[in-house]
């Protein structure tokens, strides 16, 4: 079966044109299509009769889209000039899809020019998400489940990667759930591309569900992705490198979900399994991010108690080693001009917590202050919320060392500020962390560190890599 859409990991947009620039678009195609190829053509033979006048407009729009130098601005103007013409449902779907693609291209251009989010008044990703949603609604009315799954997946992606101030994490989750449900309702086919797409849908639901603390749906998504990956394992047409990559990141997603749910021991075991599956599959950015994530898991396990044969001292030593490794890979990225300030801030916060758990006072506050400065400079709301949690932890540790009402009240204030900041942008998994810390402080405060120091050197502090989501979720 001919398939013209190629899906990379986490990418639901076409990589290349199905037709050359020289082909005539004023025809009805009789090539046998895959169920996910429809949007790559201006019309298909199995569709109900289309309006002949508007079809010429769509043919022209697709011709511009597939030229070597994409002219989506010209496509947008062409479609807007003729938006009042009669259209069939599939023509309306393609029109909304092309307009969404224009806004996505516009956002990429703004990224290249370094335009801050505050200056993007048109909100291109939001506009793209709205047009994908309209297209999906039309596709749902004509009961084309494959189109619904594709378009809702695109909507989810636009919402998830929007700036947190746009408050779209909940919508990203809901769209991912609809996409997976629509795809699951279709007849199952023993086709590798179908299974690969299904894996991406399940994994996306797991990641989005983790961010908004929808644990049951997140687990459902990751379990579905795991099932698809298992079925892909021995297929001769499955790329071995892509399979290993997907397997690795699925484990990382499980670790992140367990961590957000407070299942720290499970997160620890899954993170260890991820690390064993092949460091060569990590990019430089993800190496630094993963090591910081491992350190954070180990530090929270120190507060919870021993994990298997890992004593407190061994956990502290392993966390220190992970932070040093994170710094090393950050430095490699920095040397290659790929600085990630958010990753640096996360490492600083983890290092400050390590010092507190090791009963060291020197260097804790400067690290948190530096992370706070980075968050402020980047206008990074998610990072700022985590800085507030770190300040709460710091004053909680100070209160345990020398009890004082003012320290206790200050810690409570920082936790409440974190809850307010993160709840406002729908980052409910981080809200849950802040609430847990606040409850623990009011009931039986954070475990006081012992006087015994871990048998290791002080952790090295680090610096960064680019466009990172401060949840320590990997870059795709």
Image (cartoon, rainbow, N blue to C red):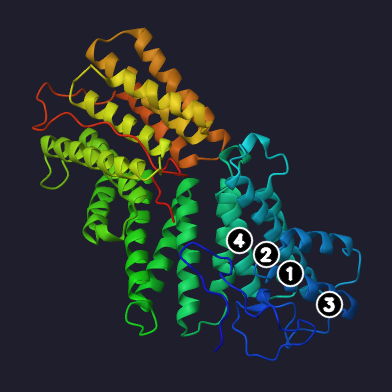
> Which residue matches tag 1?
64
Ranked by sequence position, the earlier of labels 3 and 4 is 3
Disc 2 is placed on an element classified as: loop
- How much space separates mark 1 and mark 2, taking CA atoms? 7 Å
Residue 53 visible here: yes
Name the residue: 36% across, 22% down: 442
96 over 269 or under it: above or below: below
- In the rendered structure, find residue 215 and report the number of the disc placed on it: none
x and y percent of residue 254 in the render? 35, 55
CB contact under 8 Å: marks 3 and 2: no
CB contact under 8 Å: marks 1 and 2: yes
> Which residue matches tag 2?
70
Ranked by sequence position, the earlier of labels 1 and 4 is 1
Image quarter of the N terminus: bottom right
- How much space separates mark 3 and mark 1, taking CA atoms? 14 Å
> Which residue matches tag 3?
55
**3 or 4: mark nearer the eye:** 3
Q: Please indicate whether residue 343 sits to the left or right of residue 7 in the image.
A: left
Q: Quadrant of residue 245?
A: bottom left
* Residue toward you, 28 or 24: 24
- How much space separates mark 3 and mark 4, taking CA atoms? 24 Å
Residue 133 visible here: no
- In the rendered structure, find residue 154 and report the number of the disc placed on it: 4
């Amino acid at each position: 079966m001919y398939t013209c859409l190629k899906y990379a990991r986490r990418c639901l947009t076409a990589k290349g044109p199905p037709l050359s620039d020289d082909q005539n678009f004023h025809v009805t195609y009789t090539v046998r299509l895959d169920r996910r190829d429809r949007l790559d053509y201006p019309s298909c033979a199995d569709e109900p009769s289309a309006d002949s006048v508007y079809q010429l407009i769509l043919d022209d729009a697709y011709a511009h889209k597939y030229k070597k130098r994409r002219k989506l601005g010209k496509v947008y103007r062409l479609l807007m000039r003729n938006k009042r013409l009669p259209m069939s449902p599939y023509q309306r779907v393609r029109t909304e899809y092309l307009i969404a693609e224009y806004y996505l291209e516009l956002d990429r251009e703004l990224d290249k020019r370094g335009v801050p989010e505050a200056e993007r008044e048109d909100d291109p990703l939001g506009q793209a998400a709205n047009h994908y949603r309209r297209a999906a609604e039309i596709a749902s009315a004509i009961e084309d489940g494959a189109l619904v799954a594709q378009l809702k997946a695109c909507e989810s992606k636009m919402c998830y990667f929007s700036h947190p101030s746009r408050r779209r994490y909940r919508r990203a989750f809901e769209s991912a759930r609809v996409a997976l449900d629509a795809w699951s309702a279709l007849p199952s086919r023993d086709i590798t591309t179908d299974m690969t797409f299904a894996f991406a849908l399940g994994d996306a639901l797991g990641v989005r569900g983790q961010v908004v603390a929808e644990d049951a749906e997140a687990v459902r998504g990751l379990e579905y992705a795991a099932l698809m990956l298992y079925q892909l394992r021995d297929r001769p047409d499955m790329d071995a490198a892509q399979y290993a990559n997907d397997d690795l990141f699925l484990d990382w997603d499980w670790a992140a979900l367990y961590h957000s749910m407070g299942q720290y021991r499970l997160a620890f075991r899954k993170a260890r399994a991820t690390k064993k599956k092949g460091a060569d599959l990590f990019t430089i950015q993800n190496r630094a991010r993963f090591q910081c994530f491992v350190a954070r898991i180990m530090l929270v396990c120190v507060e919870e108690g021993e994990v298997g044969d890992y004593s407190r001292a061994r956990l502290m030593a392993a966390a220190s080693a992970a932070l040093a490794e994170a710094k090393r890979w950050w430095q490699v990225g920095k040397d290659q001009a790929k600085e990630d300030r958010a990753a640096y801030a996360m490492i600083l916060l983890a290092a400050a917590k390590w010092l507190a758990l090791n009963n060291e006072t020197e260097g804790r506050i400067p690290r948190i202050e530096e992370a706070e400065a980075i968050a402020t400079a980047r206008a990074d709301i998610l990072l700022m919320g985590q800085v507030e949690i770190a300040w709460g932890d710091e004053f909680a540790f100070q209160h345990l060392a020398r009890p004082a009402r003012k320290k206790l009240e200050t810690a409570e204030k920082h936790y409440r500020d974190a809850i307010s900041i993160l709840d406002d942008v729908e980052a409910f998994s981080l809200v849950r962390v802040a609430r847990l810390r606040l409850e623990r402080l009011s009931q039986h405060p954070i475990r006081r560190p012992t006087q015994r120091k871990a048998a290791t050197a002080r952790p090295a502090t680090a610096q960064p890599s680019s466009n990172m989501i401060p949840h320590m979720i990997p870059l795709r």
